[in-house]
Image: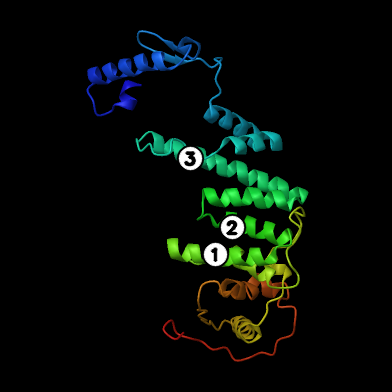
Amino acid sequence: MAFEFWPDSTNAQARTNLRQALHHLRHALRDADSYVRLGTSSVQWLADGPAEIDVVEFEADATAGLASDDEEALARAASRYRGDFLVGCYDEWAAPERERLRALAVAVLRALVTIARRRGDWARAVDDGERLLRLDPLDESSYRLLIEAHASAGDRARALRLYHECVAVLDRELAVGPHPDTIALYEALMTRGGLARADDPTSAPVWDRSPLIGRDHELGELVAAWHQTAPGRPRFVLVAGEPGIGKSRLVRSCSPSAVARGQPPWPLAPTRPTVRSPTDR
């Protein structure tokens, strides 16, 4: 314990510092012997003492809730987590513990959002999803959960704004574009079909449920190029554009598996594909 608190001191000095700290603790804490047992070479916190340690209680509820999908335990854990562990403490031992507890809180909130989605409690899903996103503003999967929650709660405008916020944050902080699943979710919001029920595990992915809008010409080129590869004539097609405009969705729509399933579902007049070089955009 002395070394953990004073790693840069000599062993003797660290032990002296610890004795002084414990002396001050005994005087500052009423009924100190009810909380800690101080020996000549040991210090023990009494688990049955008249105190509640938020970190201990949080971990117990989080572990139990995640193991059994117990909503009450998860809700208690979420309420106990009120922020990062020992904010302002920059000692080396505190940083890993802070990250571990935050990751556990993220898992708890994600589980609560999942439970709320299954039940169709979108107001609760939105509340927990917003807390989840505040814990890690760069977690794109959390954006998707919250976008779906807002859309399913009937707030389509907020869901769309959140998508654009996600794209801006990823570009500004990480210099990357959104994941194809995020783009597909956005495209589903832009169609009349909307989103699938979150409690239906057999629902198809959103990009399989919504029609591809405004890309007939490009899709025709890609499908024609794909069919021309069947006799063994290779083709190279470069799809380029700004992040978030649907490049991945377009390519996925004419992937070999999609073509094998008969997609796209409407007839397309074959067009001669434009084969571009990597420098011709």
Q: Which residue is mark 3?
A: 84
Amino acid under disc 2: Tyr
Q: Which type of secondary structure does the marked residue at label 3 adopt? A: loop
Q: Is tag 1's residue or tag 3's residue first in the polypeptide sequence?
A: 3
The 10 Å Cα crowd at callout 3, few under 14, some 14 to 19, many 20 or more, is some
Residue in the foreground of this view, choosing between 2 and 207: 2
- Are discs 2 and 1 less than 8 Å apart at CB? yes
Label tally: 3
Q: Quadrant of residue 195?
A: bottom right
Mark number displayed over residue 143: 2
Q: Is tag 3's residue or tag 2's residue first in the polypeptide sequence?
A: 3
Q: Which type of secondary structure does the marked residue at label 2 adopt? A: helix
Q: Is tag 2's residue or tag 1's residue first in the polypeptide sequence?
A: 2
Question: Which residue lies at the image location 59% right of the left edge and 57% below the top edge?
Answer: 143
Q: Can residue 244 be seen in this snapshot? A: yes
Please determine whether, in this image, residue 274 is positioned above or below residue 97: below
Q: Which residue is mark 1?
A: 165
Please determine whether, in this image, residue 267 is positioned above or below residue 87: below
Question: Which residue lies at the image location 64% right of the left edge and 60% below the top edge?
Answer: 147
Residue in the foreground of this view, choosing between 150 and 278: 150
- Could you say where residue 236 lies in the image, as x and y percent from the top left? 51, 81
Please determine whether, in this image, residue 19 is positioned above or below residue 244: above
**Spatial CA span between label 3 and label 2:** 21 Å
Q: Can residue 185 be seen in this snapshot? A: no
Question: Which residue lies at the image location 35% right of the left edge and 10% below the top edge?
Answer: 41
Q: Relative to 23, is 138 on the left or the right?
A: right
Q: Which type of secondary structure does the marked residue at label 1 adopt? A: helix
Amino acid under disc 3: Asp
